[in-house]
Amino acid sequence: MSSDPSPKRLKRGNEEISSDSYAANSNVDSPAYSRGELWFDDGNIILIAERTGFRVHKSILSWCSEVFRDMFPVPQPVDAEMWGDCPVVHLSDTKQDVERMLTMLFTKSTSGFGEVLPFVTVSTMIRLGSKYQIDHILQDAIYRLKKCFPVQLEAFRNSYTTTPAGHRLPPNPFAGLPIHITLGDIIPVINLCRTHQFPSVLPSAFYLAAGCTSQILVHGSKDADGIRSTLSSDDIVRVLEGRSKLHHSAAMAFHPAMSSTLSPLCTNRAACISSLEFVVKIKLYERVTQGHPILPLRTPRPLQKWGICNSCSEHHASIWLENRKTVWAKLPEIFDLEVPEWGLPVAQQ
Ligand SMILES: [Zn+2]
């Protein structure tokens, strides 16, 4: 706790009040701080972050967190800073982080496994859940992150893997997952998982980072609080080198040799060879010239519309799906990451 001497006389609108009446009523506004959204009149501790105060209950904070319990000495030191009759504790976190954390602890509006949370909230849950040792908040956030960035391809379900190659992605590629994430959140996701050591999240997060623009990779991106995150220079190199490897893999998926690979059950060999040559040339050209590094995990595109028979279309889809499995298995190698549990069933992690 730190002391912050209050002036002898305080102003509230046009009314001047004495420091005695200020001290007697802890719910008057402070000259030094503003009130946050979380303010319980019967609270008995005021947490201050960036000069914003949140009046809450010591007992609930102490019950959730040993770190908070240790912050509330009994008895109260005689020189403790007070806001009215309520003791003050200063935190070094941002006011947005503290407000989100307290909202989770004191209301039910942003917690619960069934609710989709913005990434910035999950980031708060991990950073402050770790710092203050609030286990249920931390575990909820880790569960959500691992749902979005699993170690198994079958569990990596989002529009990048369910929208056929060549089809436009929907505006929210991560719809249906427990975190509302956009590509702009991927850099903070990587940094968060680096700091808090969740290596299993990294391969698929790096895979998505490979689809970010070079501008974002080099200059970083801002989160919903306006805080900019940038990758370390080593991680930028990992993404760029991995992007080249994925680009190569995407091009190889349309290798010219593919045009003569037909299904043994092909019903129209001459037409299928001719159509496959056309598809391979056009699509290979598109991939090589435009570069779609996040293509290899997309779902295969049906080829019947180019006059290719059903058997050959299914045959090429199965080749594509084998390539997809190979790329997934190699993601840690592609991005130079150590992830021992990669690809293991959840029970073996
Ligand atoms: Zn055919």
Image (cartoon, helix red, strand yellow):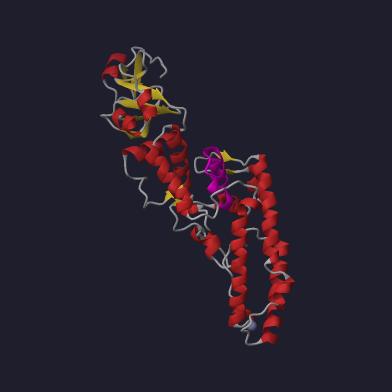
The span shown in magenta is 186-204
Tally of numbered discs: 0
* Image-based side of 158 in relation to 231, left or right: left
Of residue 217 and residue 52, the one placed in the foreground of this image is 217
Query: Where is residue 147 shown, x and y percent of the image?
Result: 46, 53
The residue sitting at 26% across, 18% down in the picture is 24
Q: Is residue 62 above or below residue 225?
A: above
The residue sitting at 47% across, 48% down in the picture is 145
Residue 192 located within the stretch drawn in magenta: yes
Query: Where is residue 2 shown, x and y percent of the image?
Result: 42, 18
Can residue 305 be seen here? The reply is no
Q: Is residue 267 above or below residue 219?
A: below
Can residue 224 be seen here? The reply is yes
Residue 16 located within the stretch drawn in magenta: no
Query: Where is residue 7 shown, x and y percent of the image?
Result: 38, 14
The residue sitting at 67% across, 54% down in the picture is 243
The residue sitting at 58% across, 75% down in the picture is 302
- The secondary structure that most of the magenta stretch takes on is helix
Q: Is residue 45 above or below residue 269?
A: above
Query: Where is residue 69 shown, x and y percent of the image?
Result: 35, 26
